[in-house]
Image (cartoon, rainbow, N blue to C red):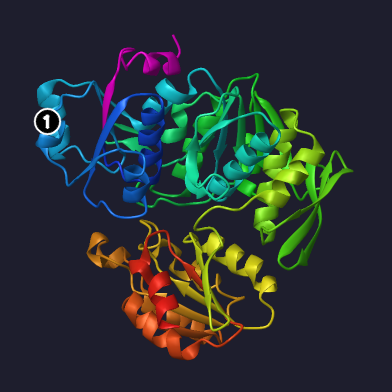
Amino acid sequence: MTVLEKELNVIRKDVKTVHLIAACGTGMAALACMLSELGLAVTGSDRNVYPPMSEFLAQRGIPVAHGFSARNLACCPDLVVVGNAVTSDNPEVAELKRMGLCYCSMPQAVNHFAAKDKDVLLVCGTHGKTTTSSLLAWMLYVAGLDPSFMIGGMLKNFNCNFRLGGGKHIVIEGDEYDTAFFDKRSKFFHYRPEMTILTGVEFDHADIFADFEAVKAVFDEFLSGLPAESTLFAFDSDPAAVELVAGKSCNVVMYGQRRESQWTLGDVTVNPPESIVDMLKNGRLFGRFSTRLAGRHNMVDALAAAAAANALGVPAEKIGEALATFGGVKRRQEVRGVKREITVMDDFAHHPTAVAETIRGIRPFYPDGRLIAVFEPRSNTSMRNVFQDEYAGAFDHADIICVSEPPMPEKVPEPIRFSSRQLADALEAKGKEAYCFPNADAIVDFLKGRAAPGDLILIMSNGGFDNIHDKLLCAL
């Protein structure tokens, strides 16, 4: 019996009621909605119940209790799904153990209820997972393959981050973060994919990985376990990805920018509001496509999705149609509003590589004004000083940089804590106009008098950033 078969046997087959602990996370909320669509009675709980996920769940009739309490399990559910942010001392965890309830992790539940009869198409890597998996899902949908998907961002084409389709494929964003307090393996270990995309590997998640070698070791173990009959698409310009795929037993297909790769990017032309991109397959033009995505990093993600979709039989014309009609993903270069001819854009970038590529990619689309970069170091890695020096090189294409102090700095011991003041000083030493602010409100007060018509204010954070986008639009 395989590991996957053992996991599927963890959950009994007559489940009718499910409770999710920490239901307001993006992935857990999607799972809750999936289970509800499958006809199960679903409840949830979370410490922080607020929009947009609270509304997302309420619209689908899924009640979510505010706060964790043993009382939330009084209904004696058939199954409890435990989110990866839940700790072993959570009162609901203590209660489910006292009651002897069946429980599992989110990936186990996805496998059992959504993926067990599907061909899994898995997208993993440090950067670009959400965009690549969203593009692949949309390409399959446009081609009429009726895919299912579970993705870590809201696809604007569906206004949703999950779908239960009637086709044979399910697209899953494979996260390297740990699974649950009782299972410290990366989430992607739970899936047995027919096809995998590896977008690249860098150091991240400093709260669970000691160093880059530890990150690579996890990916190496995962890739080494891929079925020999499966296909692995790997980005050819990422040194770690190239190193990790060497000698793997599955069918390896390289994509990116090297001439010898099976799939390569050709010319990329910026023609606001569109990008025109040439894609080559085995050295020959596969197609010239237009898309509203910006930046070469997004073109590489589109190339990966196109290569995988084509391997599943999707022709170039359908891939072109999908790229032209792809609405994007919320919080990825998402324009939140325009006031006084000043554009406010939201982006999820927080790793220094993502920050640099996002700014570089979006800069040509706003040539008439300044690019004002607003950065909140909020992730478990960015709040640490592991990338203190690297961030100083991430803002080269910005005209003004506003850096917020990390929220909840007490979460990180002072000796390893990121310093926003030090970053602003380093940027000033390079001749950049940079400022450090205590919070979002201080940044809004500064920008409402400083921003001018034609400017782009690019706000980068992996969290809500104290609703800075709406505050700024109101102030403007």
Q: Is residue 10 magenta?
A: yes
Residue at left 77%, top 67%?
271
Q: Is residue 116 magenta?
A: no
Q: Secondary structure at mark 1?
A: helix
Residue at left 34%, top 43%?
57
Q: Nearer the viewer, residue 203 or 58?
A: 58
Image: 318 above or below 11: below
Q: Nearer the viewer, residue 125 or 313?
A: 313
Q: Nearer the viewer, residue 191 or 211?
A: 191
Residue at left 81%, top 39%?
316
Q: Position of residue 350 (x, y in %)?
A: 46, 61
Q: Which residue is mark 1?
A: 95
Magenta segment range? 1-19
Q: Nearer the viewer, residue 322 or 288?
A: 322
Residue at the extreme right? 284
Residue 199 visible to the viewer: no
Query: Which quarter of the image is occupied by the C terminus?
Result: bottom left
Q: Position of residue 202 (x, y in %)?
A: 53, 51
Residue flagged by tag 1: what amino acid is it?
Glu
Residue at the extreme top? 1
